Amino acid sequence: MKRAIIIDDEPLARTVAHEYLMQHTDIELVAQCGDGFEGVKAIQQLKPDIIFLDIQMPKISGFEMLELIEDKPAIIFTTAFDEYAIKAFEANAIDYLLKPYSQDRFNSALDKWRSGASKPEERVEKLLNTTQLYAEETNRIVIKNGSDIRIVPTQDIHYIEAYDDYVKIFTKETYYLKKKTMNYYESVLNSNDFFRTHRSFIVNLKELTRIEPMEKNSYVAVLRSGKKVPVSRTSYSQLKEKLGI
Amino acid sequence: MHWFVLYKLGIICKLAIIDATISNAILAAIGILTVLIFKFYQPGKANRVYRAVYVIGVVFVFQFLLVHILKLLFEGDTLYLQFIERSMPIRAVVALLVISFITITHWMISYLNEKELTEKNQTEIEAMMREAELVKLRQQIQPHFLFNSLNSINALVISQPLEARKMVQQLSEFLRGTLKKDEQKLIPLKDELAHLNLYLEIEKVRFGHRLKVETKNCENCLESGIPPLLLQPVVENAIKFGLYDTTGDVVITIETKLNDHLLTVEITNPFDQETQRSKTGNNFGLESIQRRLYLLFARKDLLKTRTENSNFITTISIPQLK
């Protein structure tokens, strides 16, 4: 018996998915969740094989919720109308259901999953590193610290540093680890506020106090906190231009 | 004027009456011809040289015709022919003045006409663009709302058929209300609130118990004028903001007041101060309302937002023209 979870903030939308799922006797519905927080908890506790996931939900979106889960189950996205998300699905060949969807359409999505022909996990990883998932630019980052979920406004970020497959996001008090790429953050963060000074560093320009030369042709950016961040030679001229000096 | 001058010449010599008739006839013919030519061929503003050349050319033609016709008529009258010879420069100057006057007057009239026409076209185009923009701003029904509502109906069809039917009717009535509205005209607030209510009923079905709406309307507000379909996007924004920013129950309040020929509608929704610090309602819904109010009333101060504790408050003011 396979286990499934439905995550959607609209009760009637969950009803439809539940009803369609009842036709499939090999799948058991183990939980229904009304938001992403409940979703994270239920997935960790119940370890489902497949989830039906809405995108626009309270507090954290379906995508933000996925970022918080390490061992991702199979995912069937459901959405009414999210232009950017749909484009991203298409680009990554990910199956999704457009509301209102029919039983047939629902069945074929499950058949595709059962056949196991596609290994969707990789594609979902890629999707989450896609820059255009939302119409608006990112103004917050969702982070999980143990069982605690935190939403960090981007203006609280001091700088971001590359760390193997992860990035370290530094705020005033602490840092958070996030499995994302530097390129991803470079493109989603507001380019008026953030600047990539180096292959491995993105700096919040509001935190920048001065730029100091280091030995021959290299520079460091000094942040308000006193932290020194390297500035590459190419970035240095761009940064000077940006700051108008 | 011309006749008068020639009449004065006529005192010197009676023959001048014939002379005057002929020269004026030629001048009149040339004048009419000039008007006709410039009617069909309008040299651009820059082409002043062309006009000058034309005027001088025409004067030469006039002189040529006049001399030859008069010489033919008064053959033998040596004295008069001498007079003609002597008066030629004066005739030329007069002809030059008259033709210049005709050309310039004609040019000025047509220039003014043209200017008036372009100005009229310009205002017409501007009015059309404004109207088109208003229509566009108004018709932004969120596809998200529409498809989710259809999905809710899809769920109700099996479990609660009567509810499904009711929702189909509400959704239809709501959509119909968004279709045929005259953009420029204000409608009574009570009609706008009725339309808003249809929308809220649908949203309540979608979000179930989570959404609560409280309305406080002052009695004498209900007949006040308001642009159609103005409140729904603001309330939609408040619902989205409220529902997607918190996980508990959401209370949206709508309060109307009428003070000193100004109708104000205040819409309040809760939000999370922790996570939404940077957001001050910088979303498309409110931007387009701001733009609509500006196009209708030429004022930028009619939409205001503020935060109070953990509430986000949007205030819309509508001047009452009475």
Image: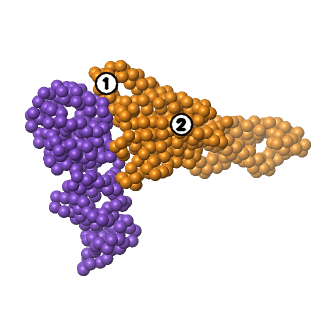
Chain colours: A purple, B orange
Question: Which mark lies nearer to you, 1 or 2?
Answer: 2
Residue type, mark 1 in image: Leu
Report the disc number at residue B104. Answer: none
Q: Are marks 1 and 2 on the same chain?
A: yes
Residue at coordinates 63% horizontally, 47% vertically from top-left? Answer: B51
Residue at coordinates 57% horizontally, 41% vertically from top-left? Answer: B264
Can you identify the residue that label 2 sits on? B216
Q: Is residue A84 above or below residue A211?
A: above
Question: In the displayed structure, does residue A18 sit left or right of residue B61?
Answer: left
Q: Is residue A205 above or below residue B310?
A: below
Q: Position of residue B196 (x, y in %)?
A: 48, 32
Give the quadrant of the C terminus of chain B.
top right
Q: Residues within 10 Å of mark 2 (few under 14, many from 20)?
A: few
Q: State which tag comes first along the sequence, 1 or 2.
A: 1
Residue at coordinates 11% horizontally, 30% vertically from top-left? Answer: A26
Residue at coordinates 35% horizontally, 71% vertically from top-left? Answer: A224
Label 1: element kind = helix
The chain letter for the residue carrying disc 1 is: B
| Quadrant in the rendering for residue B274 | bottom left
